[in-house]
Image: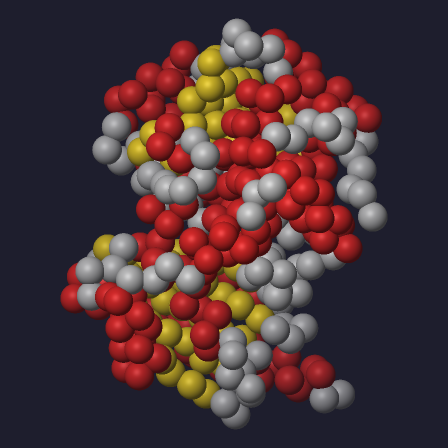
Amino acid sequence: MPLTFEREIIDKVQQVLLRAKNIVLVSHTNADGDAVGSILGMYHLLKNNMRGDQHYTMILPNGCPFTFDFLPGASLILNADSDRERCVSSFDRADLIIGVDFNDASRIGSLADTLREASAAKLLIDHHINPDTTLFHTVVSQPQISATCELLYWLGIALWGPEMLNHDAAMCLYNGIMTDTGSFAFSNNHPSVYEAAAHLVKYDINATDIHNKVMNSWSVNKMQFLGYCLDQRMHIFEEEGFAYIVISKNDMQRFNIQQPEVEGLVNYVMMLQKVEVGALVKEYEPMAIRISFRSKSDFNVQELARNYYGGGGHRKASGATSNKDLDTTVQEMEAILRKELAAFHQTQNR
């Protein structure tokens, strides 16, 4: 079933796009497949459907993970960590900034203040809850959608019609849908996502090749790192119904693992039969800890992330940040999961 939009929203988006000449596209820090796919997908949609005198700049706070280097246009994405002056200058010159796959300026790290202070019109296209409607002048938000790339697909049809796609846009949008649905295995799949995917693969994108390049191209180091994590860094509490993996900065350095390579490890604890809630705790820097929560029951990890950490995301997949040290973060998280799951089970058993 196609996704529809209010006419007022489509009119607003069309107006801001038509007025813009210098457009900046930006997504969140530690970019995943949906962030990269949506920033590139939007770039190709605009290039394919808008007038030729517009200038586009794509920016990711800490760059495009090498996993997605094969996507068309990936080499054009600027890294704000290594090329900050150029990125800030692009924000200053822009008359339109388009944020994709994040709901709040804090999700773009060191670029947050630059975004807030920019005088350009601001358009947000995202599938997370609680979008910042005060910062962004125009907001396209559909939290029930599987991925921002799926949202962009339906938005593109509403803006330009079913022929709005080309090969490059289809390839990038498919990449984001595939990764954010876990190759169509997660519970965020609705009929609309299969309809979108069916249309995208008609553009000769070689969906199998995309899957293999993203999911089946691990280095020996990463495979050995996975074995180490499962053997040494995974903690399982079957009676309580949760498990988690803890990764320190030293662990990543020991195996020469980059930050984006650890993101999917939380899915391994979710394979355990009696585990309904899983977590991945990652130390990027001392006192800078990122937690990824997952749920395969009715337990709401979005509420947990928001209530205890000020984080958020989706009901079954959410994230949070802790500014405490790794050991303290893990101890507190474990106590929180015990408490909340016990209360959840008590409610379920009534």
Residue at x 63%, y 38% (from the top left corner): 203
Count of marks overlaid on the render:
0
Residue at x 34%, y 79% (from the top left corner): 230
What colouring method underlies this structural image? secondary structure
Left or right: 192, with 45 as reference point: right
Nearest to the observer: residue 138 or residue 212: 212
Q: Up-down: is 306 above or below 342?
A: above
Nearest to the observer: residue 294 or residue 21: 21
Residue 161 is situated, as x and y percent measured from the top left of the image, at 76, 27
Left or right: 218, with 71 as reference point: left
Say which quarter of the image contains residue 259. Answer: bottom left
Left or right: 299, with 98 as reference point: right
Residue sitting farthest toward the top = 53
Residue 238 is situated, as x and y percent measured from the top left of the image, at 50, 90
Q: Up-down: is 103 above or below 323?
A: above
Q: Is residue 159 visible?
A: no
Residue sitting farthest toward the bottom = 239
Q: Up-down: is 82 above or below 320?
A: above
Residue 115 is situated, as x and y percent measured from the top left of the image, at 43, 27
Residue 191 is situated, as x and y percent measured from the top left of the image, at 77, 55
Residue at x 68%, y 42% (from the top left corner): 202
Residue at x 70%, y 82% (from the top left corner): 347
Left or right: 65, with 43 as reference point: left
**Viewport quadrant of the C terminus:** bottom right
Q: Is residue 169 visible?
A: yes
